[in-house]
Structure formats: structure tokens, C-alpha cells
Image (cartoon, rainbow, N blue to C red):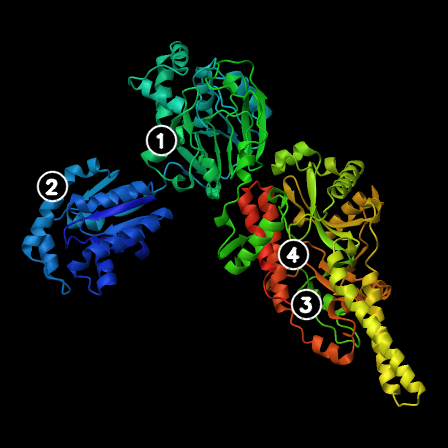
Amino acid sequence: MKLTIPELSLVVLIGASGSGKSTFARRHFLGTEVLSSDFFRGLVADDENDQSASRDAFDTLHFVASKRLAAGRLTVIDATNVQEEARKPLIELARRYHALPVAIVLNHSEKVCFERNQERSDRNLGRQVIARQVQDLRRSLRRLEREGFRHVHVLTSPEEVEAATIERQPLWNNRREERGPFDIIGDVHGCLEELQELLARLGYTAPPEYGAAGGTAYRHPEGRRAVFVGDLVDRGPDSPGVLRLVMTMVEEGTAFCVPGNHDERLLRKLRGRNVNPTHGLDLTLAQLEREPAEFLADLRRFLDGLVSHYVFDEGRLVVAHAGMKQEMQGRGSSAVRQFALYGETTGETDEYGLSVRHNWAAEYRGAATVVYGHTPVVEPEWLNRTVNIDTGCVFGGRLTALRYPENELLSVPAGQVYAEPIRPLAPAVAPARSAQQEHDELLDLEDVVGKRRVETRLHGAVTIREENAIAALEVMVRFAADPRWLVYLPPTMSPSETSQREGLLEHPEEAFAYYQRAGVSTVICEQKHMGSRAVVVICRDEEAARRRFGVTGDGSGIIYTRTGRRFFDDREMESGMLERIRVALTTSGLWEELQTDWLCLDCELMPWSAKAQSLLLQQYAPTGTAALASLDAATQAMESASARGLEVGAHLEEIRRRRDLADRYVRAYRGYCWPVHSLEDLKLAPFHLLATEGRVHADRDHSWHMEILARLCAADPGVLLATPYRVVPLEDETAVAETTAWWEALTGSGGEGMVVKPQQFIARGSRGLIQPAVKCRGPEYLRIIYGPEYTRPEHLERLRMRGLGAKRSLALREFALGLEGLERFVARDPLRRVHECVFGVLALESEPVDPRL
């Protein structure tokens, strides 16, 4: 005997004590799926037979069941459940979590149950107790469906129980195995010509015999399938034609369809229900009067078989007519169907007498993309991974489709206004900001504070400590630029291992050795500019900034620091630099080549003094000035003492050496400073083209980045500086030696050094992700970092004991978070999910790591 149960259900075992419920449960369900009242009595009272603990035991059982159902896991309740008052809270629990309640009844005789209880050593129930349980069960049998059980299976003998098998049936809305690609089409409302035009533009073709008896459905040559979001009928000129087209496509497997509220009303009318023929239903009924009875019968079967919503692509895509909350996705209940058809209202009415709809999408936090229609909008806009594609074709708007997984929108205009909407489709005055943009300005505090685990594609889960998150929040709230621009923060970078060469702390040899040990065959070495890290987000124009970033009134781009603050206090200077970059992008043809209207660049902006004025004035210059002044005075004093015949030669020589080191310190930082009076005094050196529309360029090797950015810089060498670099096969000793000599020349002339990276943007070794870059700095630059006298042997020996483990762990985590945030933005994830990564990078920066590294 096969018992079919839905894959997501609350299975309630019903039977007197001794009927074999626990044995049945162990045989057919996982141990973790079964919640036994006996077990929970033992859990709360250390005695499974302690009936005085039943209230607490069932409270705990219901709590665990609620957590399992909320997570979408089948749950089995192993208790007698013979009385309605015991079953009622279980039915309510199933309804609350939109799971289907299933009753499996073990309806054995009083004699069988009593004999089995006699064989048990752990309890001894009287015959009267068992008789009462059997009577309660049999009085309940006829009421189980009325109580709310969607499936009732009754087993009337031990033989039936022994022969029973359980088959778990996927819910009708579960099409997770269907991965697409799909073309999801908005509310059609009888607009057949527009639908045919849209299908043609999407690439679907219909054979010449389409429309004839037995004609074939529209098909896509690449195997794409259409998904209709419902409201096929009413108000438009040819609802039967639309129905015939969609029904044929669904029947032949080239389309899916979910019902809309107008389709549901038509079905009720076809069933003979008393339905008021308003909102265009009268027009549809008049059009159907010309159709044969066979078509009407097929239509009724078609509409009756439509499922409230579909879950596709392993849960990544949900399609429903009016939308679908996260907790309802992939579940089956009358509440789920009601929400799918009508959405949710606030109970209020607007000035047109229409119900005010609750904006469920603004609160949506699910991982799946939800595509829906129902409420006509002028433009489909993304909000929290949801998009409404009903653009009011029947009201003179457009018929829109979303191509999935590309997330590309395609529309065709309506041939005419077929019906006048009660509420105007377009507002008389366009709002300054869309609903999405208004919503995206509001970041939920819960999304960025507290201890968090951020899942990344590259490096698994990254933990953000609560105290670090608070520090990051303070920085972002007090100092950061408009958060809608902040889609990326760059990671920190670890130095190479410590060199043992005389007078050096870092040398290319250790950087090359690190990557060679990790299995990297080719690296790229880029000159390290002594500037300040700058992220450039630039759009082709202000309309692109509004459309893609939701930013209005703040220009068409931004340059910000690695802590999310605007780089320039002078907004005219920023605007001038952005305009030069924009013109260079146009001149070089990169807008068209990259098929984008925005870019995100990782850069160095020079001189270092342009951003580090306070550091220079408060730290470096006072240190250098004080050292030189004091050592000059000490030199004069020692020279005077020597002239008087005192033996101070050794002391004088020591002071002169120290004075020379202080002078080197001053010359070191002065080499990175020059006055900035105009834009021409600045240099921007981009080294990563991080992202453009639809793509994060982490799949390109570093040579590609260098070559394409060199073209950009060549278009405006006045302010854009191409970064010199060398590609080095590590097995080539000549190339390694030449690059080492190049580094020595760079650092010998006062340069900072170079950055060594794997040729591939993302590199993995036997132990996982490899450092995306290590910096190898010259001795004179390190003098700025470690102090004037760091090269003295006793200091170098101490500094060689520095540990890099914490810094390298930090670099990997920040690298993974940075790219994760960009990937989420490009995938049009909600802003809160992008900022989860951005905040994460900033929070990690407050971890206790030696800043000199």
C-alpha cells in the first residue's frame, strides 16, 4: 500500500498507545524528522513516562517543529493525537508555515494495542486507557479532513501497516530542476498582437500552420521557454487568441504559466459560480461566446490546472502573478495561493477607490529572484531581487519580458489604449526618485551590525566581530560618501616575507619564492606608485547614475578612499578629474567596447601629499625637522668639543651617521610630495578595471587589465598615468634577474617598489586561495614607515621577527569580500547585500594588525 505525502508537510501520526507509531516512524522517516512526545518528556523531565511533564514536553515539541517547518523540512509528530484538541495546534502550526498537514492513522483494534502494551517493560497502561484512546480515534476519523488535514491515510490492520510504503511527492510548484533559460512575460490581458510581436523579438518562431487545428506552438531555436505571469484575459481585444497561444505552448512544453486574479475569476465563472462580470470579464465572456464547446472545456481544464507559483533553477527564481514572500516560496496553502493571486493590501483605499497594496518587495530578504506583475508600472525596476514586469500593455503601455538568467528586459509598445485604467498608469508629474531609489536610501541597521558571517564565493564564510562592525558603522555614518556609490572597498595587501639580505627588510626574491611554492608559474610585477588608494566609480552621464546607482543630484561619478570617504574636499577638482576620465573613455572607445555605461576602477592617485597633508604636517615633517635640528646642534657641539681637544671622535661620527639617516628620511617622504594647484598637478594611475555593466572582470588576467587601462591612459596622459609592469615566468631565471634589477633601479631612485601578483586575477593553490598580491618595498620607502634609523643592524634584526600571518589572513578575507560585493552589485542584488560586504571590509580594518605591514 503506497502512501503519497507532499515533500513539505507536517505528518501527524494518529493511533492509540501500542498501535506501532514509533516503529512505523523509524521505518519510513529519518530519525531527525521524527519528533516524539516520549522523547520530549524525557528531555524536560528525565522520564519519558512522566505525564505531569506533558505540557512542557509538547511546548518544546511544537517549538522544534516550528523551526523545522520554517526551514522547509518535513516533520513527523509521533504522539497518540487521538483527540481533536491535540491535533488543533498542529494544524495551526502547519498553516502558519504553509506546510500541508497529513494524517496517517494506525486504526488498530483495542485488543492489538493492549497486547502490545503488555509486552512493553517501560510502561503499563490500563485497558481502560487504551480503550478510551481507541474510541477517541474512531470518533475522529470522519472529522479529520474537516479539521484541515489535506491528506488522510488510514491503515486498519497490522498487515496493512507492514505493507505500507511512503512516497514523497514534490509539490506542484517545485520545478527546481528546470534551470532555464527563460523568458518571463508580463500581464498580457488579451493583447494578442503585442504578445506575438514580443515572442518574435525574443526569438520564438511559429510554423506556418500556427492557428490551424493541431498547429504547433511557438518555439525558441535555442530551447528557451516562456513563463507567463498570469492575467492572460480581460480588457484586451483577443483574450481567446492569447489563451489558445499560451495553452498550446504549455501543452507542448515550450512555456509555463501561473494564474492571475483575472484568470481565476474567469475560471470561477466557467464553473458556474456567481461572478460579477466587471473589470473586463464581460468583454472576455463575449469573445468566448464565439468559441466551440471543446475549446471552453479545454480552457476550464487548463485554468484549473494552473499552480499558484513556480520555483525554478534550484530555488534561484520564483515566478508568481502578484509576488511571493520568502517564507511562502515553494509551499502550498490557501494563503500562498491567495498571496500569489492578489498580493497584500493595507486595508486602506486610495483616491480612486482602489485598495492600497502593501509593498512586500521593500521588506523582501530572500535569496531568490522574484518576478511578478499584477500592478501596472511605467518602468520595471529592481527592488531587493524582485521586479514587477507588468508595464500596462492593455492600458497603452508596453508588454515586457525579462530574459533569465541574463536579467535583460525587452518590451514592445501597445498598439493602442484598449482600456482606460481607473488609476492613471503614469503620474501627472514624474517623481524625482523612484520607489526603489527611495527605499535604497534606507539601510537597515540589522543588516550591518552585530556578529555576522558573510558568505563569499571565493573564501567561504568571513566572520565579522560585533566590536569591529560598530567601528565600521561609525566611520560610514560620520564620514562616508553617499552609500549608494559604495559598491566596493579595496583590500589591504601583505608584504613579501622578510629578507635576510644585509640592510634589507624586503626583496623580490621572497615574493617570487612565495608564488613559486604556491604553484604559480607566471607573475606580473607592477610599479608601486607612492600615492593614495582611490576607487573611481564613473557613469557615462547622470541618467546612467540614476538608473544604475539610484543617485540623483550628486553628479555622474565619485572618487573615494579605501574607507569610503570622498577623496576630494574640493568638489570642482573631483568633477574635473571625472570629466577627464569620462572623455578618455569616450576617446578610447571603451564605453562601446565594454558595452557599459558605468565602470569601477581601482587606482592610485598622486601625489601622496594630496591626501596625506595632515599626516605630513603632524607626523613626518615635525619628526624630520626635529631630528635634523637636534642632530645639527649636537654636531656643532661635538665639533666645538673636538676643537678644544676633547676625545669625542667616536661620538661625533655616530651623530653624523644618525644625521645622515635623518636626512634620508626627509628626502624619502619629500620625494612623494609636490604642490597641487590645479588638476594638471594630479596623476591617476588605474591598475584594475574591476567591473562594468553585467560583469566583474576578475576572470581576466592582469595583463588584460594593464593593456586596456594603458589605452585609457593614452587618451589623456595629462592626468592619467599608465602603470609600468613586467610579466615574469618564474622558471625563467633571466626574466627573474632582469625584474629584480628593475626593482633595484626603481627603489634606488627613490621609488616605493613594486607589487607582485599571480598573472591570473584569482589564483588557488593546494591550500586554497593564494594572496592576490604582495608588495615589495624599497629600503628608502620603508624608512618612512619604520623610522629614520630602522636600517641599523640592531633594529633590522628586531624587525625581521615581524609576523605576516594575521596580515595575510586579513588580505584574503578583504579580497574575497570586495569581489563578493561587486558580484552582488553586478547581479543586481539588493543594496543591503552589497553593503554587507563593504561594511565587512571596513570592519576588518579595525582588527589589531601591525599597520606598518
If you read the primary sequence from the N terminus, does the residue marked by circle 3 or circle 2 appear first? 2
Q: What is the quadrant of the C terminus in the image?
A: bottom right
Q: Could you tell me the amino acid type at mark 2?
A: Arg
Q: Is residue 548 visible?
A: yes
Q: Residue 564 shows which numbered tag?
A: none
Q: Could you tell me the amino acid type at mark 4?
A: Pro
Q: Nearer the viewer, residue 276 or 544?
A: 544
Q: Could you tell me the amino acid type at mark 3?
A: Arg
SS at badge 3 = helix
Residue 322 left/right relative to 429: left
SS at badge 1 = helix
Q: Residue at left 12%, top 43%? A: 138
Give the quarter of the image for residue 337. top left
Sort mark 3 into few (<14), some (14-19) or many (20+) by Cα contacts within 10 Å.
few
- Tag 1 residue: 338
Q: Which of marks 4 and 2 is in front?
A: 4
If you read the primary sequence from the N terminus, does the residue marked by circle 4 or circle 1 appear first? 1
- Tag 4 residue: 491
